[in-house]
Image: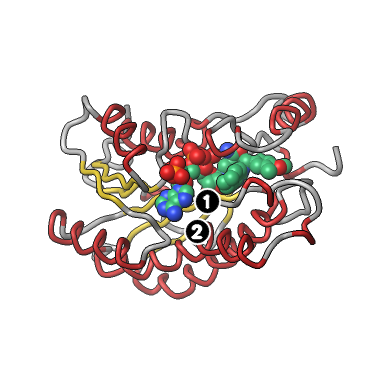
Amino acid sequence: MNTLLKGKTILIMGVANKWSIAWGIAEACLDAGANLIFTYQGERNLSNLQKLTADLPNISLYKCDVTEDQDIIDLFHNIGNDYGTIHGIVHSIAFAKKEELEGAYYNTSREGYHLAQDISAYSLVAVSRHARPLMKDGGSILTLTYIGAERAVQNYNVMGVAKSALESSVRYLAADLGPENIRVNSISAGPIKTLAAQGVKGFGSILKVYEEKVPLRRAVTQREVGDTAVFLLSHMSRGITGENIHVDAGFHAMGLL
Ligand code: NAP
Ligand code: 1JT
């Protein structure tokens, strides 16, 4: 337990189940004394979230499919009515069609490209715009990215290009919102076995090579990402914005494996 987020209300978007990186972040935020609000995309995630949060006091769950402008508008309208002010947002959302995450990047379809950009990058822009009026005391917005934004990583393909747009959006949003003391940063996580990752062909072998070669010789955990998220959401990181922090056991510092 610590008090780094005591009195802060944090919105967490992207918990699918207990393996989600967003859930690791939620647990770390709860240990830091935060009040949490969650969004879910559809009914399947609602029942998972209800089970995960059943024993927690004062938790609110709101529906938000980020491809729907009206869902985003309604979300912040309802949070405004119910809470007035929020202090942080965790955006832990991405999507690409499975068939676009293998083979050559040049085979990416126009539709698959747009879908990955819409859900994985544009959504941060729309969420930031609508959250801004509720961040009256300043705030911290956080998103999740992967090294495939910075390097050409086999199979990551259209997601890598969407993550590059996401990381660039972090810098532009940080420039826009800095004068209001709203900070915008990303965490670049190493590979973690989650629902999203498990759908990817060859993910198990990526993880194995990683564990053998990275400086710390192990994978990172959802909770390790969560602890860095608490830092970025807290007063401790008040001088940091437009930044990308790698929580990847040192992989980003290495040359070709
Ligand atoms: P996850 O548990 O499957 O989380 C992904 C979340 O995105 C799910 O809750 C999913 O909801 C949500 N989502 C997808 N489309 C959405 C939409 N239209 N509207 C609202 N929510 C939507 O997987 P994860 O690995 O924790 O991923 C979280 C973030 O971490 C992603 O940005 C991912 O790129 C990033 N990341 C992951 C890894 C890794 O190795 N796992 C590494 C680096 C970065 P549904 O389940 O309902 O679709
Ligand atoms: C999505 C998926 C976003 C998997 C993701 C993701 N961000 C990170 N991962 C894990 C991953 C995936 C690949 C990879 C390395 C890590 C699945 C579909 C929804 C969006 O290749 C080296 C492909």
Ligand 2's quadrant: top right
Which residue is found at the position 53% from the left and 62% from the top?
121
- Residue at the outermost left position: 81
Secondary structure of residue under mark 2: helix
Q: CA distance from mark 1 to mark 2?
A: 6 Å
Amino acid at dot 2:
Ile
Evaluate whether residue 177 shows in this view. yes
Q: Decide: few, some or many residues near mark 1? Use Cα within 10 Å; few <14, some 14-19, many ≥20.
A: many
Q: Which corner quadrant of the image does residue 79 belong to?
A: bottom left
Q: Position of residue 232 (x, y in %)?
A: 44, 49
Query: Which residue position is annotated with label 2?
Result: 119
Which residue is found at the position 74% from the left and 46% from the top?
102
Find residue 94 and name its label: 1
Evaluate whether residue 229 shows in this view. no
Q: Position of residue 82 (x, y in %)?
A: 13, 54
Q: Is mark 1 within 8 Å of ligand 1?
A: yes
Which residue is found at the position 54% from the left and 33% from the top?
194
Q: Is residue 87 left or right of residue 188?
A: left
Q: Position of residue 182 (x, y in %)?
A: 37, 64
Q: Quarter holding the N terminus?
A: top left
Q: Are marks 1 and 2 in contact (CB under 8 Å)?
A: yes
Amino acid at dot 1:
Ala
Q: Which corner quadrant of the image does residue 150 belong to?
A: bottom right
Secondary structure of residue under mark 1: loop
Q: Is residue 133 left or right of residue 198?
A: left
Which residue is found at the position 28% from the left and 27% from the top?
51
